[in-house]
Amino acid sequence: MHHHQPVASTASPRQLNSNLGPVVDLDYAAYAGNTTSPTGIVDGPVAFYGNIRYAQPPLGDLRFRAPAALDESTPTSQVLDARDWGPPCIQIPAVVGIGSEDCLTLNIWKPTNASAGAALPVAVYIHGGGFSSGSPQGFPMYDWVAQHPGGIVGVSITYRLNLLGFLAGPVVAADGDLNTGLLDQRAGLEWVQRHIAEFGGDPANVTIYGESAGGASVVMQVAAYGGSKPVPFKRATGQSIGFGPTNTAAQTAAFFTSAAGIIGCPASGNDSMPCLRSASIGAIVSAINRVQLGVFSPVIEGPTGFLPDLPSRLIAQGKINDVEFVGGHCTGDGNTFAGGSPADFQTDDDIRRIVFARWPGVSNATIDQALAIYPEPGAAGSPFATQYDRAATMAGEIIFTCMDWFLAEKMSSDGVNNVFSFSWNAPDTVLFNQDPFRGAVHTSDLYYLFDGTNTFNNAGNAFTPFNTSEAVLSKEAIAYWTSFAATGNPSTDKESISPTWESFVAPDGSRRRLEFTRGGNTATNSTMQTIGEAEMARCQFWMSENVTAETRI
């Protein structure tokens, strides 16, 4: 397994101070942070540094290009105010003045008393939001850093979204770069390699995390360049891995033509990209809002690209970087993506029509097979009480449930020791109260990991205070998540009342995962469970090459 070696700091021994807050000096830049906690405690145990540039602003000629390196060669004694967040990248729906094209920044949380060279574990979070919305502001890592007993450093990365991050097609490939949003994430991780030591972090001990499109990003970072280049991290956690179907070359070209037309630029020829680069942000915003939602997302680039093939195919072929891995999903992920409510699902045909509207490339023959391996309610041995249960299980397993299993199988068979799996069965209370039938819906894990932040519609910091049993589960989950960052084993620094999180492959050869469940006011009801043979057979079906060729994941 390859990793970047930590780069020795060249920072000169000088003392820069600021009345704004504690200063971290990177030589080419210096930042004053904020030690006031989210609850208003002054001089708290965690120092926050936000709005730190990791690449040049992707403006003008740098629009639709890979992130350009900063000039880090020239020392400065100016101390920048890093006490607040940088702007989000431009969202969907896009509004001029909300979010910015100049958004390539990251945020850092460190123990206030951790000095340069402390070599603490580093946890990096990549937010979700369908590659079209979201920002780090919805995912504060204060609790992770405050809670971990040995000290960790938290980082979150902002990356270009929707049209600005994922415009694709041959015209872009000829005069620009594809998947710039993924390249942004990589550039942020490379910045962490160069500079996190000055914040007390260990560049040789970095773990990346993400949920939904952030979980997809984690998979794509693991599979970057088909595993042919070392990765700037040691471990990865994929939560509710969600993406697809990946656009075909024909779709990509059509969306490019559509966007160029709305912006007012030619869709081919040498003038196309210069015109798009000089277009006003108002024209770009108009195109983001008028081209179909979510069509600008990662694309397959071919052999030499960052994403040379479908991630499922790269995993199947072993063209990935082997890293220590935690993978899991919410038990209600499929309820979020089934496409309807219980009353909508009465017959097989309802499942065909509603669930597979999301997967238009799936053939009738494959749907027939799927219906056969998910026995209808009432059939012998069927685990499904209703057609809705059957539909929602299918909608979840197509990618959210089965890709974490698939990666865990691959890492384990490749000899990676630290591989763990989970299912999250504790609802986000706010979302549950809106739709109880949906259970532990997509993003329920985030509610507990990020301080009751309801992040579903990029809700910024809409905190919901925890009651006692919620707080117990939050503390348990954060302990496992940060323990994995520290040692590769989620149980090393677990809460004493929490169960041991056992390896994915049990000594008897069965596959095991931790199911997170709320309990009482002193302990959760989380417990290890064996993954059933029927579920694994269904996952083998969804992850088989002929089926992923149709789902395009």
Image (cartoon, rainbow, N blue to C red):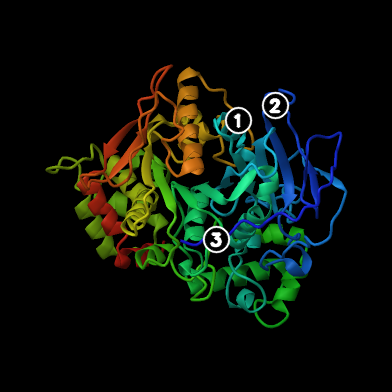
- Secondary structure beneath dot 2 equals loop
- Cα separation, mark 3 vs mark 2, equals 39 Å
Label 3 element class: loop
Crowd tier of the residue under label 2, counting other residues whose Cα lies within 10 Å: few below 14, some 14–19, many 20 or above: some
Task: Give the x, y percent position of residue 124.
Answer: 58, 47
- Camera-nearest residue between 502 and 27: 27
The quadrant where residue 334 appears? top left
* Type of amino acid under label 3: Ser
Asked whether, in this view, residue 415 is left or right of residue 227, the answer is: left
- The residue most toward the bottom is 269
* Res. 361 visible in picture: no
Is the C-beta separation of discs 2 and 1 under 8 Å? yes
Q: Please tell me whether residue 9 is drawn above or below residue 376 in the rendered image.
A: below
Residue where numbered disc 2 is placed: 44
Compared with residue 81, is residue 28 higher up or lower down, i.e. above or below? below
State the image quarter where residue 383 is shown. top left
Q: Nearer the viewer, residue 30 or 113?
A: 113
Residue sitting at the far front: 13
Instruction: List x then y, in percent, for residue 454.
Output: 56, 34
- Which image quarter: residue 61? bottom right
409 relative position to 435: left or right? left
Q: Amino acid at mark 1?
A: Ala
The circle drawn on residue 146 is 1
Residue at 37% over, 39% down: 423
Mark drawn on residue 82: none
Task: Provide the residue designation for mark 3.
Answer: 297
Q: Is residue 79 above or below residue 309?
A: above
